[in-house]
Image (cartoon, rainbow, N blue to C red):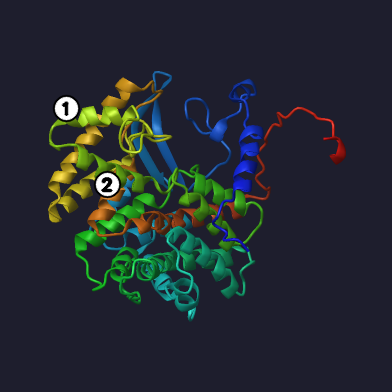
Amino acid sequence: MKRISIISPEVIELSKKILDNDKINPELYTKYDVKRGLRDLNGKGVLTGLTEISEIKSNKIVDGKEVPCEGELYYRGYNINDIVRGVENRKFGFEETAYLLIFGELPKEQELDKLLDILAEYRQLPTSFVRDIILKAPSSDMMNTLQRSVLTLFSYDKKANDISIPNVLRQCLQLTALFPLISVYGYQAYNHYYAGNSLFIHQPIETYSTAENILHCLRPNGKFSPIEAKILDIALILHAEHGGGNNSTFTSHVVTSSGTDTYSVIAAALGSLKGPKHGGANIKVVEMFENIKENIYDWDDEEEIKRYLSKMLDGEVFDKSGLIYGMGHAVYSISDPRATIFSKFVKRLSHEKGRDKEYRLYAAIEKLAPKVIGEKRKIYKGVSANVDFYSGFVYNMLGLPTELFTPLFAIARIAGWSAHRLEELVNGGKIIRPSYKNVCDRKEYKRLEDR
């Protein structure tokens, strides 16, 4: 059998038929009023469902007209700013947020303690799972490791296909507890077998939070500072959920509606998040900044920065895509509240790490990029930094490898996916089935010998 990664000349030639025959005339989308990407021309999402889990606000009504406003994000009706302030001096912020998203209310102290006990109990992989599943088949892509491990856990679950609410809740809490271990152990396997570095597997510590256990299991000495753990905890809170209409969360609703098992649903959501248009954006931001730092002589010279950003938009530099990564969002216009919150903590961490100069560069580009984009592009709404703009910088300062950037997103978002899966099971009933219009002309079939 030929190596599966080889694309033969025959396949290359056949692929040309797909490029020729699958191309749809763009004018037809306008003719039939197709909402491509389930969005209208202004980027507003098509209403396909109802949820009580989270809400994004980017506009308000003034004198009967809809106008842009500072971005707001709500989890179960609570403003994300209030949630972050409420947990800032405690180490279990993400766990409290997961409780809120899944159960629909803020936990009392005893309820939070009970959840922490449950997660600590579930934070153990099946016997020999690390050796037989993670270490024996290491991957260079941690999202592949995470997705494969989730599907494999199906085989260890005697009630894998049971979609009753108690059983699905049990599965979701177990996956919430296990995601950090699978992700970090997957990276350790990759770092050893692909990069040739020493292999070490730390067991989680029962009294540690999710953020603390990530840092403990990742670092050779298992050590970290309180501010490092706190900022990672804040990052998990900010990524835990986002409005219900994002690609991976919508995927969890669609796949859940078919009546399938939890592992299949979460694996599908992971497949969505892996895409660079969704979960991998912060990696592009980090790569972009490395390019900027190499090509801008004076990081404090705003005019030099503006000139380089202009070249970037013109497709002359970096990856020549014509994009400034980390700027703009499908919903937010004036501001992304997650980026606003993050920027305050980033400043503190950059000072502790002695990277104030880099932070000033990030802050300068956050200020200048919208102006440059406004001058170069015809835009229908405002442009501001999104959460990906700062998250990669934070992970880099924490010493987290880029291979774990998207899995960290998943470690947080499993809370939101779980909440939406449970909500779909409680309120669903009909399989989600959108409509596609066929625009292919009718053709007369010809027998093989007549073609």
Q: Position of residue 137 (x, y in %)?
A: 48, 70
Horizontal and vertical percent position of residue 19: 61, 36
Q: Nearer the viewer, residue 294 or 236?
A: 294
Mark nearer the N terminus (1 vs 2): 1
State the residue lying farthest toward the bottom: 127
In this picture, is 47 found above or below 155? above
Q: Quadrant of residue 405?
A: bottom left
Give coordinates of residue 383: x percent, y percent: 34, 30
Label 2: element kind: helix
1 vs 2, front mark? 1
Q: Which residue is mark 1?
A: 303
**Residue at 31% across / 26% down in the picture?**
373
The spot of residue 314 in percent (x, y) is: 33, 27
* Amino acid at pointer 1: Glu
Q: Amino acid at mark 2?
A: Phe
Quarter residue 324 falls in = top left
Quadrant of the image containing the N terminus: bottom right
Q: CA distance from mark 1 to mark 2?
A: 26 Å
Q: Is residue 256 above or below residue 162?
A: above
Q: Residues within 10 Å of mark 1 (few under 14, many from 20)?
A: few
- Say the numbered circle drawn on residue 342: 2
Q: Nearer the viewer, residue 109 or 277?
A: 277
